[in-house]
Amino acid sequence: MREKPKLSREFARFIKFMISEIKPRPPYFTPFNMITIPIILLGMVILVFRFSKGLGAVTNLSQEFPWGFWIGFDVITGVALAGGAYVITFIVYVMRVEKYHPIANVVVLNGFLAYVFYAGALILDLGRPWNIINPIIGNSFGFNSVMFLVAWHFLMYMAAEFIEFSPVVAEWLGWEKVKKWLSAITLGAVIFGITLSSLHQSGLGALFLMAKAKIHPLWYSEFIPILFFASSIFAGLAMVIMEGTISHRVLKDHIDPDHHASHDEIITGLAKYAAVAVFVYYFFKLLTFLHNKQWTMLDDFWGFWYILEVVGFVLIPGCLFAFGAKYKNVNIIRVGSILAIVGIILNRLNMSIIAFKWDAPVKYYPSWQEIVVTLMIISIEIWAFRWVVSRMPVMRKIGRK
Amino acid sequence: MESYYYVNIFETKGLEYLLLMAFLVLLVLLFRYFKAPDSPKPK
């Protein structure tokens, strides 16, 4: 009988707390806000047209090119760049390398938001978006489809990442008992998440196995799933390095001083892992190149384009990671990270758009509306990230405000 | 019957084996590069 007033008091406290937290906080007129607010508003207007008049009203998609920029960039590239979450949680929770523990929460948050927004962007690209629930509820499961695996994995991975991040939410809400319980199940969620991640990173590559005749031979190989998985490791690490660099400049008030001091050491350590991952990926890439005897294809535009990708944006960043890690030069590592991120974007866009139906008489180019909606998704994700980091104890220890 | 040359590096997949061996050697060298004591920072 005594529980009821206590529960209602707690509920009232929760509502009051949430209202105070949801309110925007100054400064309001920052350059980031001034740039992103018009993009978000314009993107919203475009989405109204997309859902009321159909995909054809705002995109350059057609029967010949049913997959465009939203799939190629938002989903295929976005998921690869979100690979940092499973790599870092593996290093911290499974390998027990405590040095990287300070960045575990923020990386998981980034991964979670990336999946919510970039994988969520799938809904925009579905002609009948209400059918997205079909693989989950069993209406034509489609067990044989790679899409079935990807759909389930995205959903379960988002749940696993939310569980991994939930102790931070519980701490923010002041729910100590719940936090203790959630912390106890984190390891299980991490292991589950890593398993899912390694499978759906390669699963996204497996989607392209069905398009052998459509992808340029320099990019097509039976080992695309392995290449996608291997490249997601260094892509994720490069993204973690860049996000960490930006966060340490822009959100420095929300970062623990100890974490701030160890930032360069963490980046140097991550660069070592990234260098090894690039090295392994490069070996697979060379192996498929030699196996398929593709050196005869290097003397035209596509050959040069391929060399630019694998040398300029894979080999060079790999060397920069190794050199920067060896000499503890963070700036070199940052340059390597930018090049690696560009390389992954280029690789995924080559697979899904640029070298896809490379010999077709009519080519696909994204419309300006597709690009604005993509920028809108990225902007909203950064807004959500900033909101969470400025309110929850993501980058600071318990008890420090 | 198709003729088969054991000395053909392409037919025997010798090239792939050579690459694999080079990869393992280079991987060891990469780890040694990281483990070696720090050299002075280049200017």
Image (cartoon, coloured by chain):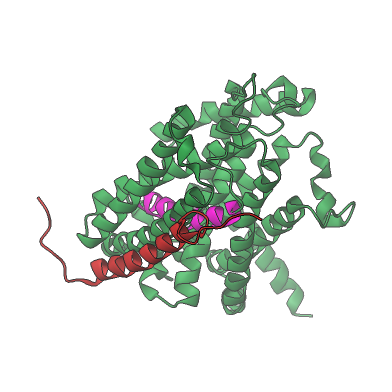
Which residue occupies the foreground of this view, A25 or B14? B14
Shown colour of chain B:
red
Q: Which part of the image, by quadrant, shows the C terminus of chain A?
A: bottom left
Q: Is residue A123 left or right of residue A167?
A: right
* Residue located farthest toward the front when viewing the structure as drawn: B1
Whether A364 is among the magenta residues is: no
Instruction: Write down the quadrant of residue B39 in the picture.
Output: bottom left
State whether the magenta stretch is mostly helix, strand or loop. helix
Instruction: Write down the quadrant of residue A376 in the picture.
Output: top right
Q: Specify the chain shown as green.
A: A
Give the residue at x 61% y 68%.
A195
Where is residue A5? Give x, y as percent: 73, 72
Which residue occupies the foreground of this view, A184 or A27? A184
Give the residue at x 24% y 66%.
B33
Q: Is residue A332 left or right of residue A362?
A: left
Whether A241 is among the magenta residues is: yes
Question: Which span of residues is magenta-colored?
Answer: A223-246
Where is residue A345? Give x, y as percent: 49, 40
Where is residue A130? Give x, y as percent: 82, 41
Q: Is residue B11 left or right of residue B35?
A: right
